[in-house]
Amino acid sequence: MTGPATPGLDPVVGCHAVVSGGGTSGHALPAIAIMDRLVAAGHPAESLHYVGTCHGIETRLLPPTGYANTLLDVVGLQRSLSRRNLSFLPKLLRATLQARRLLRRLRPAVVVNVGGYASMPATFAARLCRVPVVVVSYDRRPGLASRLSARWAAAVAAAFADSPLPRARTTGAPIRREIIAVDRESDRDAARRSLDIPADRFVIAVLGGSLGARPLNDVVFELVERWSQRADLFVHHVVGDRWLATAPAARDDPAGIMYRVIGYDDRMPQLYAASDLMITRAGASTIAELAATGTPAILVPWPGAAANHQVDNARTLADHGAAILVEQTDLTADRLCATIEELLDNPERLAGMSRRAYRQGDRHRGDSLIELIDEVATR
């Protein structure tokens, strides 16, 4: 089944790029970032088309952008035994045929693959239609979809200089323009006002990815209870919609800790500007955004990621003193409490983490990714 699509392209404008990926915000947001930056580079929005899955978070994220899109009925391959895997190949084949029909109609100059299972139908279709493909690889250890697609891609846009993929050029990761524009010092007060956060509190933002992270949530719930009398802290906790019903109540007593709980939050520019510290998973997009904005963070990689690649992502900051890595097996309320309190008592260390993270973000703030896509499109 093909999901809803926005109106088609203006035939006078034509199609410059099909950008494909999605399923989670870690793939959908980079895809949107690429489209936004292509527009900023002079390409009409009408010349861009997004292809993702009708089961992903792009169903929420795409409509406000106005970009034309086609959402296909494609699912990921489960690494454990699952009845869902029986539908993987039939759905992939059907979605690839639908994507081929779409590409024959749009005739794009380039297909941009941002990774994940949702990127594969359009990428397979591009090969069938002889449309050049640019693979955007922003994990330190590329995923299966990126490794497979890179075999016949015209080029690979890699976030890191040591990418193992062929024909790779270091371009940094795709970051939204509004994230790049964040100035944590000058934007802090306005961001806190927009989020209704007091100006005089130490703000900790906790994000477990678009679906939430129960182990991380449970430790933070315990920590908030332990710190109930602290009048210097504000915790903004994005728990994931599926965990919202089991989360504790918010707290707004000015004599104690202030605690806000929310299912999903798309106000990331404001959160980066407002936060003194973030506690997050280590998805590639998150790592790139932390670096681009210079936001200090405690990173708790998701151990279920393929080949545990989030640990590698986290080390790109932690190894430079730009973040603190805590693996989930070591995550306890005591450990997290001690780490945060050490940072509270040592603001210079926190400031140093911010400076080092910002330096690591240099490659993500440039335009070389968009320049590579345009280069391939004109070959």
Image (tube, grey):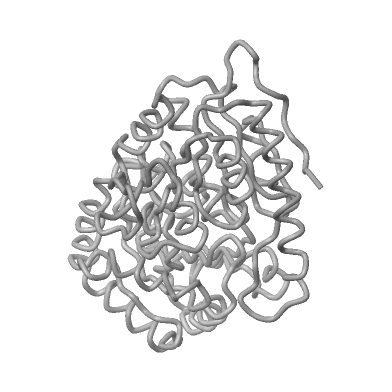
Q: Is residue 228 visible?
A: no
Q: Is residue 20 visible?
A: yes
Provide residue 355's location: percent of width, then percent of height. 20, 55
Q: How many marks?
A: 0
Q: In this rendering, would 297 be left or right of 222?
A: left
Seen at 72% across and 43% down, the residue is: 97
Q: Quadrant of the C terminus?
A: top left
Residue at far top of view: 12
- 134 up-or-down from 230: above or below: above
| Quadrant of the rendered image containing residue 279 | bottom left
Provide residue 123's location: percent of width, then percent of height. 57, 45
Query: 45 or 356, which is in the foreground?
Result: 45
Query: 283 or 221, which is in the foreground?
Result: 283
Seen at 58% across and 18% down, the residue is: 14
- 43 up-or-down from 130: above or below: above
Q: In this rendering, would 147 be left or right of 69?
A: left
Query: 220 or 137, which is in the foreground?
Result: 137
Seen at 57% across and 43% down, the residue is: 20
Seen at 31% across and 62% down, the residue is: 296
| Quadrant of the rendered image containing residue 245 | bottom right
Query: 291 or 22, which is in the foreground?
Result: 22
Q: In this rendering, would 106 be left or right of 164?
A: right
Residue at far right of view: 1
Provide residue 28's location: percent of width, then percent of height. 56, 48
Provide residue 249's location: percent of width, then percent of height. 65, 71
